[in-house]
Amino acid sequence: MNSSKLVAALIGGAAALVVNTALARDEMVRFPIAEAISAPEAIAKLNPSIKFFFGDSQPPAVERSFGVFTSNKKTNAFGKSDKIACDWAFLSAMLSFQDRALQTGGDAVINVKSYYKRNTVSSTTEYECGAGSIMAGVTFQGEVVKLKK
């Protein structure tokens, strides 16, 4: 291979590496829980008989615990704002918790915390999301319980 072809190949390889690095964006962002849970899609899909308590907010007395579970949900973020993609992943995670509660006989998920890439963020007002150019994702941990009536 002559030197000009070698230089062109090296430049092309470096350019491909730069493009791949730019596409691999994985930024940690936070958005309001209240906005995500009150979005029209969330209101339409979430069962109002299942309650969610984020961070250290105090739920009513617990009758029975069914355990701590993790919900890890991703969504396509291509062409979407970080907020839209992250709120969609948020809703998917809440639906997963809702299904778990309904399967086990629970009626609430308490101590819900962001747990993206095993980084715990406990907040009553915000959730954490990993936002990328192609994918966005949330991971939550929460305890499924039956509340005392």
Image (tube, grey):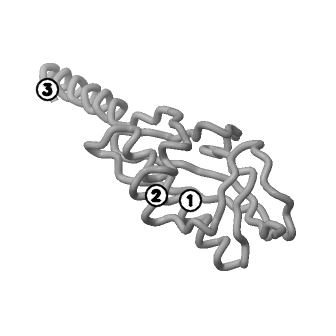
Looking at the image, is 4 positioned above or below residue 74? above
Q: Nearer the viewer, residue 2 or 12?
A: 12
What kind of element bears circle 1?
A: helix
Which residue is painted at 47% across and 32% down in the image? 27
Res 6 → quadrant: top left
What kind of element bears circle 3?
A: helix
Alpha carbon of mark 1 to alpha carbon of mark 2: how far?
9 Å
Residue 38: where, in percent of width, then height? Answer: 48, 50
User: In the image, 109: left or right of 79?
Assistant: right
Between label 3 and label 1, give the one nearer the viewer.
1
- Dot 1 corresponds to which residue? 94
Neighbours of disc 1 within 10 Å: few (<14), some (14-19), many (20+): many
User: In the image, 7: left or right of 75?
Assistant: left
Alpha carbon of mark 2 to alpha carbon of mark 3: how far?
56 Å
Between label 1 and label 2, give the one nearer the viewer.
2
Give the label on residue 42, or none: 2
Q: Nearer the viewer, residue 33 or 79?
A: 33
Amino acid identity at mark 3: Lys
Q: Are marks 1 and 2 in contact (CB under 8 Å)?
A: yes
Residue 101: where, in percent of width, then height? Answer: 67, 71
Which residue is painted at 54% across and 58% down in the image? 93
Quadrant where the N terminus is found in the figure: top left
Which residue is painted at 40% across and 39% down in the image? 83
- Dot 3 corresponds to which residue? 5
Nearer-N-terminus badge (1/2): 2
Q: Are marks 2 and 3 in contact (CB under 8 Å)?
A: no
Residue 29: where, in percent of width, then height? Answer: 50, 33
